[in-house]
Image (tube, rainbow, N blue to C red):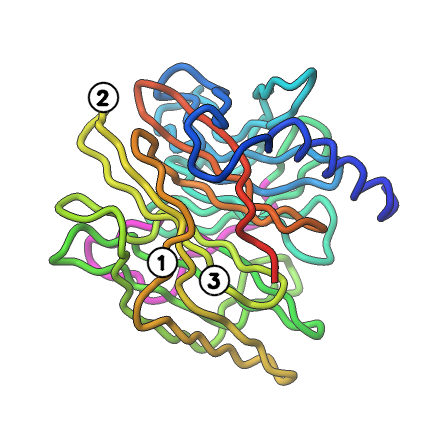
Amino acid sequence: MNLPLKLAAMATLLTLLAAAPAGAADDWQQVGADSRTGVSGLAAEAGGTALVAHDNKRPGQARLSRLTYADGAAALSPVAWDGAYAEDLEAVEAVPGMPGEYLALAGRGIVYRLRVAGDTATVVDYAPLPMIGEGADFESFALVARGGKLAALWADRGDGPGRPATLYAAPFSFSSWGQPLFGAVSRRSYVSTYPPGDGTRHISDITVTPSGRILVGSAADAGDDGPFDSAVSEAGRVTVSAAGSVRVTLAASPTVLGTFPGYKIEAVECLPGTGDALLGTDDENAGGFVRTAPYCGN
């Protein structure tokens, strides 16, 4: 699909989703009604649709779906998983410059390289994240492309006041046979401004704007029936040098862009060619919801 058609399709998606100020509860559209259909990760596709990652753990349960929009309603359709067994997928990300190629991250820190054609995602290869610490729980993954170089950002989500999130960054590439490769890793501690209190996952997802602003979701989860709370914040900036080195600068105090009481945001995705983010929730027994918010400009 050529660029004008891609932008037109994405504009249609936004028209269907975005109709009120960020933070309004009635902007959310339900896409699933139970714990198996929550939205744990999002990756925009060229045709105005998006891949959805599910954190299901049992054989036979969906790992991926496709999010589509028609007549103002959002819906999921199945995408088959073909290849190495995976469970608890928490993030999915398109590979810049490689149409149909994606990376999916499992909570225990395994990165799967996928090739998506139609309604099937085929595992090309997989590899563990570097520097996986004891008890780490990963819910986020983002790729940044600058000057032909790729960088990866990911985070251990953290847990309440006593355990900040750890944000990692590294140069990223693929081996000649397709395996994900990580360069020298840097890491920073991160504490969200909102939600407050115990049980806060300081980083539940990451996306990066075209100018290098790092946006993160944060979420509080009191159990499978809630209550839930979440926010999207600007956490800092990332730059990638001409040589491929990666630098992350975190803000002394994150800027909260929007708060969403009653929802558990686990997916934040900047939509190409727009200034909007597509947000997704995994509200456990209440299912999953999506909406847009104007967070990705500049």
Residue range in magenta is 123-141
User: Could you give the CA–CA distance between mark 2 and mark 1, rounded to whole angstroms?
Assistant: 25 Å
The amino acid marked with disc number 3 is: Ile
What residue does disc 3 label? Answer: 214
**Would you identify the image quadrant in which residue 74 lies?**
top right
Which residue reaches farthest front?
21
Residue under the point 37% across and 52% down: 109
Q: Is residue 167 above or below residue 78?
A: below
In the image, residue 131 lies at what x, y percent? 32, 66
Say which mark, if any, is on residue 155: 1
The amino acid marked with disc number 2 is: Asp
The amino acid marked with disc number 1 is: Ala
Q: Is residue 64 above or below residue 240?
A: above
Residue under the point 37% across and 36% down: 88
- SS type, badge 2: loop
Q: Is residue 23 visible?
A: yes
Q: For the residue carrying disc 2, how many other residues have a C-alpha within 10 Å: few (<14), some (14-19), or many (20+)?
A: few
Q: Is 132 within the magenta? A: yes
Mark toward the start of the polypeptide (2 vs 3):
3
Mark toward the start of the polypeptide (2 vs 1):
1
- SS type, badge 1: strand
Q: Are marks 2 and 3 in contact (CB under 8 Å)?
A: no
- Image side of residue 292 versus residue 281, left or right: right
What residue does disc 2 label? Answer: 225
